Amino acid sequence: MAKLTDSLSISPERGVSIDIGRKFYSSSFLKNLVDYMSSLKMNALQLHFSDNEGFRIECETVPELTSTHFLTKVEIKELIVYAKKLGIEIIPEFDSPGHLKRLLRIYPEWQIERLGEDSDVFPANRAIDITNEQAINKIKEIITEYLELFHDSRYFHLGADEYISFDELDRYPQLARKAKEIYQDANRTYDLFIDYINDLADLIESAGKTARIWNDGVYKKNQKMKSTLKKTIQITYWTNYNQHMADVQTFFKEGHQVVNFNDNYFYFVLGEGAGYRYPTEDKIKNEWNPMIFSGNQHITQEQLVKVTGTYFAIWCDFPNALTEEEVMEKIKEPLKAQQAVLEDYSLR
């Protein structure tokens, strides 16, 4: 499989993740972002192109999934080539089994059943039934389409965040029925989620790539796991807001490589949604270093070897809160500060 450059293959990732699912960003904006990233010697751009509100890259597997405003495959190929010339790798993210409201509008029969009142945090209308083989096969078909489009990328992000309320697994009867069928144990509902991730990771690895997922849904402290999450899956660790979420040390102990997406410092959320405030240059320079993860968790110098990189994330909770131009202007100083801290540590 093609590598961008020899140096990129061994260098820690210095990346940006951008939510193009909920907000349409033009091809020219993304190229301008790549230009600015290049000026800071950054080397990775992750495209979160699917979400409940939008699907922004042309889809041939399910054409009606594509949003009204979208990027064509030709535009994406041009972006990949453009970024590659500047030493920047484009990484795709297709999120499942949650964040799929748009897909479930097309296939409502694939929505997971939830007993009682719906969850405010994890409503069922965006979560597919991971016991439904048709639904799983369609997810795999979509992933396969984008594995081909992003054939140059070394990584494929599978999302796997914010699926259902794992504290209320008894409200999802399909899971209990399936667990009893395949494990002979109706209580192993959480393992179905782990096995779903592993199954998709196998697909990614069969294409010669590394699978990534968000941290919040796996190794939950209040859930027993008999299934084993594949150690080859890399963890993009973004948050530790819930007491039942695994701390970053857990992922090192379990043998995973980790990417630092510290939401306390690097979550640029349009409209400052979900309680976030726009990152600032001063806060990053004065308070953060590469060994600090979300929730002020500190890792050791030895563990830092298993951290593959650090990312700044642009999320579009309120997509109309800022224009493209305003987004670009507002991220420049905090991005520059992040890179300055990383450069300082690399020289030590």
Image: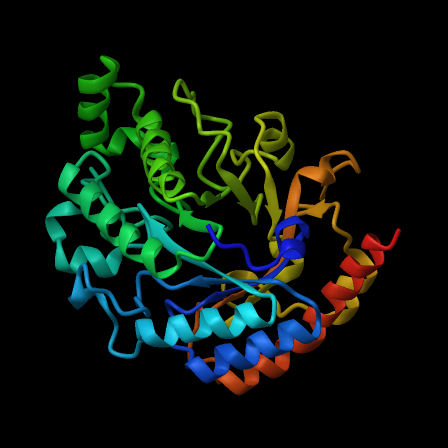
Q: Residue furthest top?
A: 184
Q: Could you tell me which residue is drawn at 54 percent across and 87 percent down?
A: 325
Q: Residue 161, relative to residue 317: is it above or below? A: above
The percent coordinates of residue 29 (x first, y second) are: 49, 82
Quadrant position of residue 78: bottom left
Quadrant position of residue 42: bottom right
Q: How is the image coloured?
A: rainbow
Number of numbered discs overlaid on the protein picture? 0
Q: Could you tell me which residue is drawn at 45 percent across and 29 percent down?
A: 230
Q: Residue 145, relative to residue 293: is it above or below? A: below
Quadrant position of residue 75: bottom left
Q: Residue 178, relative to residue 82: is it above or below? A: above
Between 141 and 252, the one nearer to me in the picture? 141
Q: Residue 184, relative to residue 294: is it above or below? A: above
The percent coordinates of residue 291 (x first, y second) are: 75, 45
Residue 71 seen from this side: no
Left/right placement of residue 340 relative to residue 76 reads: right
The percent coordinates of residue 281 (x first, y second) are: 75, 70
Left/right placement of residue 155 relative to residue 302 reads: left
Q: Could you tell me which residue is drawn at 57 percent across and 33 percent down?
A: 256
The percent coordinates of residue 244 (x first, y second) are: 51, 33
Q: Could you tell me which residue is drawn at 64 percent across and 51 percent down?
A: 309
Residue 76 seen from this side: yes
Between 282 and 153, the one nearer to me in the picture? 153
